[in-house]
Image (cartoon, rainbow, N blue to C red):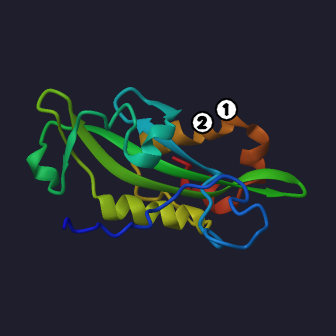
Amino acid sequence: MAEQKKKSIGFNILKNDSTSGHGGFGVGALSLENMSPVIVDVTEEEAFVDLGAMHARSVVEKGIKFLMNKEEVPNGKPYWLVWVTIERTEEGPYYAGVTACEMTVDREIRRGYKSLPEHVNKMDKSLKRHIMVDFMDEKSKKVLAQFLVNHDAGMWERSKEELKQGLQA
């Protein structure tokens, strides 16, 4: 008789109320509906939303084997993966949580560097409304700030001073 595999309960990304009010499975599960991953390309000085990054499948990450040691990818092109969480208040939406994670990619050798635990921790910190951008390089801070302002100037204006000051170059 073949062994039966136990059914595992994996991490689910939910939208709205997954339980439709019945209070059963999934109650209290984390909703990532108001979070977006923004990729900052340091070299090209551009930023863009790539929802594939929610599952480590952004255009930057596809086809790359990531290593935990940055020195193993000496020619890696630098990127920042920025988790942006939006909160809504009576005044309107604002950028409530913004956390950045380092990543490098060398397409030629199909290798890159990133720390998956750091990426998960920073995603969690963004969901908990933390601002963690002070360690970014000055050029990338400017690119991210301009991207957030251009996306919605009102959201930028309603955001915490901590974010605005953190992204000032």
Q: Is residue 62 above or below residue 11?
A: above
Q: Amino acid at mark 1?
A: Asn
Q: Is residue 86 left or right of residue 146?
A: right
Is label 1 in contact with label 2 (beta carbons under 8 Å)? yes
Residue 58 against residue 17 in the figure, above or below: above
Instruction: Return the x and y of residue 35 as percentages of the image width and height.
Output: 60, 51
- Residue 154 percent across, percent down from the top left: 79, 42
Residue 128, position as x, y percentages in the image:
59, 69
Residue at 14% across / 56% down in the picture?
69
Depth order, front residue of 48/54: 54
Residue at x 39%, y 45% (from the top left corner):
80
Instruction: Give me the C-alpha separation between circle 1 and circle 2.
Output: 6 Å
Residue 74 vs residue 54, the one in the foreground: 54
Residue bearing mark 2: 146
Q: Residue furthest front?
A: 1
User: Which mark, by number, is residue 150?
Assistant: 1
Residue 107 higher or lower than 165, as above or below: above
> In the image, which disc is placed on residue 160?
none
Q: Residues within 10 Å of mark 2 (few under 14, many from 20)?
A: some
Question: Can you tell which quarter of the image residue 153 is in?
Answer: top right
**Residue lying furthest right:** 90
